[in-house]
Image: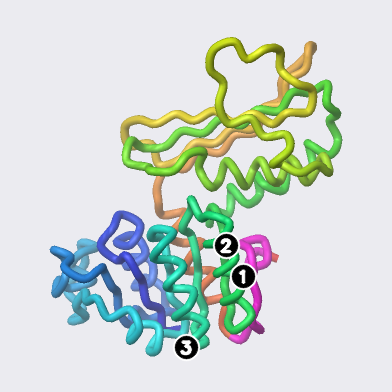
């Protein structure tokens, strides 16, 4: 499986390089950074702390999509929209881990998925995807007398909030309760907010240090509290899941898939 990585010099990009190169069923064929990047010309493997592989970082994204069987994208919304267009143009599978997408960005991903395979997930960790399933099941069984709150913490450099994973957990909980998350979501509490409305799904965001990603879903009643928690110790779990999704995409028909499809 010929795999390319966009945004290859970032923290996730470097982890993806190591993960692809460690798999016998995958071959790293290239990686790109935006034009003018200080990493242009650097050896891909050396970026990840490995022995040089003779493949240099460049800004030729169109060529990367043309050559690859699958491209992995953990970049930024504007870049991901462009990558969706390239994936559709070249019929290249695209694995999307970018968060913070707008409705218009998502519409572009959906349009591209009519032409090629796109695997999109807020989080590619196997553990988190199990947590999504558990959250939906518990939410379906506990009524509105259990207040539902989602707490997440990430490193100081994360630019979007709540995290994509927290929002995915909210969607899972809303699905379990058969409600629209947009109608029950509470993102900010400040000042005189009044009493909590029954059925709301609250979000709380923490940022600091080098935390890879912590997520807790809390179901709180007057008598008890149930907490479902996942803590990522290393970005290895995200990279492994994303590469697994890229390899899985081979021979799949065009469409928009989730990590749950990969794990079935």
Residue on which the image places disc 3: 90
Percent x, y of residue 236 = 41, 54
Residue 261 lies, in percent from the top left, at 68, 66
Instruction: Write down the region rendered in magenta.
Output: 251-263
Can you say whether 57 is above or below 230 in the image?
below
Q: Which disc is residue 100 wearing?
A: none
User: Badge 3: how crowded within 10 Å, few (<14), some, or many (20+)?
Assistant: some
Indicate which label's residue lies in the foreground, 3 or 2.
2
Q: Quadrant of the C terminus?
A: bottom right
Q: Which one is nearer the viewer's eye here, 110 or 134?
A: 110
Does residue 234 sit above or below 243 in this rendering? above
Q: CA distance from mark 1 to mark 2?
A: 6 Å
CA gap, disc 3 and disc 1: 16 Å
Secondary element at image label 3 = helix
Is residue 187 or residue 116 the one in the foreground?
187
Q: Is residue 233 visible?
A: no
The residue that mark 2 highlights is 106
Residue at coordinates 86% horizontally, 35% vertically from top-left? Answer: 141
Within 10 Å of the Cα at label 1, are there few (<14), some (14-19), or many (20+) other Cα atoms? some
Q: Residue at x 66, y 49 (%)?
A: 130
Whether tag 1 and tag 2 are in contact, CB under 8 A, the answer is yes
Q: Residue at 49% x, 30% y: name it.
A: 205
Q: Relative to residue 1, is residue 184 depicted above or below?
A: above
Lower position in the chain sequence, tag 3 or tag 2: 3
Q: Position of residue 22 (x, y in %)?
A: 36, 70
Quarter occupied by residue 186: top right
Q: Is residue 189 visible?
A: yes
Q: Residue at label 1?
A: 110
Earlier along the polypeptide chain: callout 3 or callout 1?
3
> In this rendering, is residue 244 above or below 101?
below
């Amino acid at each position: 499986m010929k795999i390319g990585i966009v945004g290859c010099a970032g923290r996730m990009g470097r982890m993806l390089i190591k993960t692809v190169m460690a798999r016998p069923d995958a071959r790293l064929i290239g990686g790109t950074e935006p034009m003018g990047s200080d990493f242009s010309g650097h050896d891909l493997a050396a970026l990840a702390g490995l022995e040089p592989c003779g493949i240099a970082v460049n800004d030729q994204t169109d060529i990367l999509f043309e050559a690859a069987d699958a491209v992995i994208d953990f970049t930024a919304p504007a870049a991901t929209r462009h990558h969706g267009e390239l994936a559709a143009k070249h019929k290249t599978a695209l694995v999307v881990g970018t968060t913070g997408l707008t409705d218009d960005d998502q519409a572009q991903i959906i349009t591209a998925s009519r032409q090629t395979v796109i695997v999109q997930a807020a989080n590619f960790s196997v553990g988190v995807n199990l947590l999504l399933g558990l959250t939906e099941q518990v939410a379906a069984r506990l009524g509105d007398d259990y207040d539902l709150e989602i707490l997440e913490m990430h490193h100081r450099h994360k630019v979007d909030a709540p995290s994509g994973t927290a929002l995915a957990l909210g969607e899972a909980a809303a699905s379990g309760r058969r409600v629209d998350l947009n109608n029950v979501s509470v993102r900010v509490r400040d000042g005189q907010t009044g009493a909590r409305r029954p059925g709301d799904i609250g979000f709380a965001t923490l940022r600091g240090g080098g935390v890879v990603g912590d997520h807790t879903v809390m179901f709180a009643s007057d008598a008890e509290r149930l907490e479902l928690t996942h803590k990522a110790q290393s970005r290895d779990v995200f990279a492994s899941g994303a590469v697994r999704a890229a390899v899985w995409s081979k021979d799949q028909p065009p469409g928009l898939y989730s990590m749950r499809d990969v794990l079935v």
